[in-house]
Amino acid sequence: MNQITFHHDTVLSDVHMHLPYVRHLMTRLNRVGQPGVYHTMSTPLEDVGKQVWRGAFFLADFILSKPVMFRGAAVLELGAGTGLTSIIVATIAKTVYCTDVGDDLLSMCKSNVMLNRHIMEPAGSEVKVRQLDWFQHDLCTDADVEFSWTEEEVADMHNNTGIIIAADVCYDDHLTDGFFRTLYQLCSNFTHTCTIFISIEKRMNFTLRNMDVSCEAYDHFIHCLSQLQDLVDGRCSFKVEQLPSNFAQFLLYERIEQLAWELLGVP
Ligand SMILES: C[S@@+](CC[C@H](N)C(=O)[O-])C[C@H]1O[C@@H](n2cnc3c(N)ncnc32)[C@H](O)[C@@H]1O
């Protein structure tokens, strides 16, 4: 039996804690159909994308509750991890660029997309799993590199993306800065207005520094949101709004304090 071994940097997403084995296939659990995705139960911090996080379910629920908004859309997901939210949006949208970093993770994500082709078929959508690193200024277009982009895909993504989605990607201040820089760069390169949906879990941590519980990652996220909103540089402007969290629940997971934000990026 596979046991979880805890190291100093082991992290658990809390999703499916009742099945503590290293890898399994989620089954369809309700009438909507839960996608089956391969994922792991615990990972070191640098591999958190191989776990499914509650924010992925929460954003997927938001998408399922607003099908008109996503129907026929060209969507880009940042930090897609196992690909669960991309798979859900692909049941409604037209094209999805499902992006993250690392060949291992992207291979797992691609397998998950293939595994769920049948639930995307009715929409006739296309999901492309590609590398998009928030700390690389340019997208890799080297044909010899797996998960790289073609020049046509880069142009298509810049010219047609109407919606960006990101689930649970703001848990480390340095990564959050890279993520927000990426949002800014993308929206500045787009030829049209783009709507961005971000889900985040407000995690409380006790810190010795404050001798109290605080949500530092969340606070930094809010700080980055307000910086983006206050930006006046003539290249791009953003309108930020918190979304009500009481939309319908279609997928099976425990809802706690997850929050969703909508940003309108206007080039
Ligand atoms: C907590 S996981 C969330 C994964 C998935 N969205 C979910 O909610 O299940 C954070 C994700 O951000 C990705 N990430 C971390 N650093 C990144 C970077 N520099 N560029 C792109 N993605 C990154 C990780 O690989 C991981 O998939």
Image (cartoon, rainbow, N blue to C red):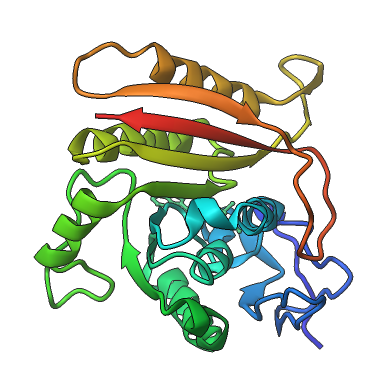
Q: Is residue 151 shown left or right of residue 97?
A: left
Q: Looking at the image, which residue is at 89% across and 70% down? A: 18
Q: Is residue 66 shown left or right of residue 161?
A: right
Q: Looking at the image, which residue is at 72% across and 56% down? A: 13
Q: Nearer the viewer, residue 145 or 122?
A: 122
Residue 184: image location, x then y, percent: 31, 32
> Can the viewer see residue 206 in this picture?
yes
Furthest toward the front, the residue is 68
Quadrant location of the N terminus in the rendered image: bottom right
Residue 219: image location, x then y, percent: 62, 21
Q: Is residue 69 shown left or right of residue 126?
A: right
Q: Nearer the viewer, residue 51 or 264?
A: 264
Q: Quadrant of residue 253?
A: bottom right
Image vertical order of residue 60 relative to residue 179, above or below: below
Image vertical order of residue 115 relative to residue 165, above or below: below
Q: Quadrant of residue 148?
A: bottom left
Furthest toward the right, the residue is 18
